[in-house]
Image (cartoon, rainbow, N blue to C red):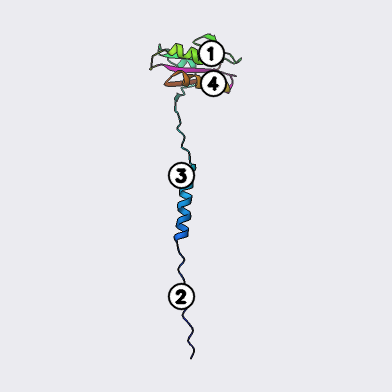
Amino acid sequence: MFEEPVRRRGMASLTPLIDVVFLLLIFFMLTTSFMQTQSLSVVTPAPSADELPTDARVVEIWLMGDGTLRLDGKPVERTALTASLREAIGERKDMTVTILAEKGSRTQALVAAVEAARQSGAKAVGTARVEKIRP
């Protein structure tokens, strides 16, 4: 007798969802920052200084166990390392900076030496750990 009315399921509108997605997309596009990273090739040879080639194109930084630094055997202050390296490298683009870290030298000194090499214009940096550096 009585027919029940047919219930139609309403379709949910996707418009508000799409609006929210676009707003989130715009928000993330505006707030994202892209960093440009600088790279420096670091060559890590065998842990013996005897295996390192002696070449006119190599500048050596010695990290002594007592915390002092030497550039090609001459004592240098950490604050003057970048300027001394820049002077040693000069205009030559084929120079390699080799950092010899004596046993007991500090990691911060190694980081400072790599940073000084990068700032001085060196294109390649090599590192080696040695037991004792012979002056």
Tell me the element at label 3. Answer: helix
**Residue 67 position in % (x across, y down):** 60, 16
Residue 112 - label: 4
Residue at the spot of label 2? 8
Dot 3: few (<14), some (14–19), or many (≥20) neighbours within 10 Å?
few
Determine crowd level at label 4: few under 14, some 14-19, many 20+ residues with C-alpha closer than 10 A. Answer: some
Q: Say which element carries label 2.
A: loop
- Identified at 52% across, 14% down, the residue is 81
Query: Mark 4, mark 1: which one is toward the viewer?
Result: 1
Q: Secondary structure at mark 4?
A: helix
Q: Is residue 27 above or below residue 54?
A: below
Please report whichever mark, 4 or 3, sits nearer to the chain's N-terminal start. Answer: 3
| Residue sitting nearer the eye, 2 or 98 | 2
Real-space CA distance between mark 4 and mark 3, rounded to the nearest whole angstrom? 36 Å
Q: Which mark is residue 80?
A: 1
Q: Amino acid at mark 4?
A: Ala
The x and y percentages for residue 96 are 42, 17
Tell me residue 113's x, y (percent): 52, 19
Find disc 3 in the rendering and name its residue: 29
Of callouts 2 and 1, the N-terminal one:
2
Magenta span of residues: 95-107
Q: Is residue 28 above or below residue 81?
A: below
